[in-house]
Image (cartoon, rainbow, N blue to C red):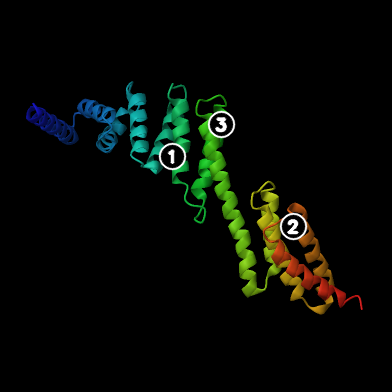
């Protein structure tokens, strides 16, 4: 019995492969569509894609085109070909705005761009594109069954952009050790906190701003030192006001003691 089932399985497999190879080589558009649909339903998306690619130009404007292009886009998405999937889903929603699959297609198109979003340290062009696509979907389908997931994806992408922006601002603080441009670091950190007022990195940003202003003051020319020391002290106060038990408190207190010592020189 087991041997019989094994032989039957091999026979079916060979038949399936043979059918696919025949469809691939022949010019019969209908045959290609039928085989591609079977492969799609069986989850063999790579093979289905090859056939869909062959027949797509011939099916534009035909009654079966809507279903064919939907299966084509889905196959690309499930096969993790996200660039092409995003494009095909965009084309589908533009070409068939009244389709019952339009909502799903627009969401999956946006999700395709989300899948292309790289880690925060890399260029975020695809992240911005994904956010635009997701926001368009949210605006178009406010009551969608996909809304919870769409909002989750937006939150994740925005957090990625927030982290990248923070790391850039922090980098200005680090490189100011070498180039001495502490003002650029302060400005960058200020801009970060303006752009992300509720950021989870606010305590860190406040400390690095204080650190930059402290270094600017300590290394300042005498004529500007007192003013800059007082600015640094103000930035210290902003940090401890935000969190009196800051993880940076011990380090910041040592810096404050140095500031107070330097300020005493101006009161004599």
Identify which residue is drawn at 41% across, 30% down.
Answer: 92
How far across and down, in percent of the image, does residue 143 sit? 56, 24
Q: Quadrant of the N terminus?
A: top left
Using the rendered view, name the quadrant where residue 14 is placed.
Answer: top left
172 vs 241, left or right, is left
Element at label 2: helix
What is the residue that sits farthest to the right in this orientation? Answer: 268
Is residue 132 in view?
A: no
- Label 2 packing within 10 angstroms: few (<14), some (14-19), many (20+): many
Element at label 1: helix
Spatial distance from mark 1 to mark 3, Cα to Cα?
Answer: 15 Å
Is residue 160 in view?
A: yes
Q: Earlier in the sequence, mark 1 or mark 3?
A: 1
**Residue pointed to by mark 1:** 112
Q: Quadrant of the C terminus?
A: bottom right
How far across and down, in percent of the image, does residue 55 sit? 27, 32
The disc label shown at residue 239, or none: 2
117 vs 252, left or right, is left
**Residue pointed to by mark 3:** 138
Identify which residue is drawn at 33% across, 39% down.
Answer: 79
Q: Are marks 1 and 3 in contact (CB under 8 Å)?
A: no
- Label 1 packing within 10 angstroms: few (<14), some (14-19), many (20+): many
Q: Earlier in the sequence, mark 2 or mark 1?
A: 1
- Label 3 packing within 10 angstroms: few (<14), some (14-19), many (20+): many
Spatial distance from mark 3 to mark 2, Cα to Cα?
Answer: 37 Å
């Amino acid at each position: 019995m087991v041997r019989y089932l094994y032989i039957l399985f091999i026979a079916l497999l060979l038949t399936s492969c043979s059918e696919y190879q025949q469809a691939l080589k022949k010019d019969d558009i209908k045959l290609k569509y039928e085989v591609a649909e079977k492969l799609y339903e069986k989850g063999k998306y790579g093979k289905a894609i090859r056939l869909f690619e062959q027949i797509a130009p011939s099916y534009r404007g035909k009654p079966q085109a809507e279903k064919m292009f939907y299966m084509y886009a889905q196959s690309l998405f499930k096969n993790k070909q996200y660039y092409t999937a995003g494009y095909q889903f965009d084309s589908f929603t533009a070409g068939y705005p009244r389709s019952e699959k339009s909502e799903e297609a627009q969401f999956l198109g946006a999700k395709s761009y989300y899948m292309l979003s790289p880690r925060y340290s890399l260029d975020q062009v695809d992240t911005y594109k994904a956010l635009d696509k997701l926001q368009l979907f949210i605006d178009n389908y406010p009551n969608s069954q996909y809304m919870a997931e769409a909002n989750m994806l937006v939150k994740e992408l925005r957090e990625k952009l927030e982290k990248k922006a923070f790391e850039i601002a922090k980098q200005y603080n680090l490189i100011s050790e070498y180039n001495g441009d502490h003002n650029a670091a302060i400005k960058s950190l200020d801009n970060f906190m303006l752009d992300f007022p509720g950021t989870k990195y606010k305590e860190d940003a406040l400390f690095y701003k204080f650190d930059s202003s402290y270094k600017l003051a300590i290394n300042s020319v005498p004529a500007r030192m007192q003013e800059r020391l007082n600015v640094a002290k103000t930035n210290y106060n902003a940090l401890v006001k935000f969190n009196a038990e800051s993880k940076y408190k011990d380090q910041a207190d040592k810096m404050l003691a140095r500031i107070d010592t330097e300020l005493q020189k101006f009161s004599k």
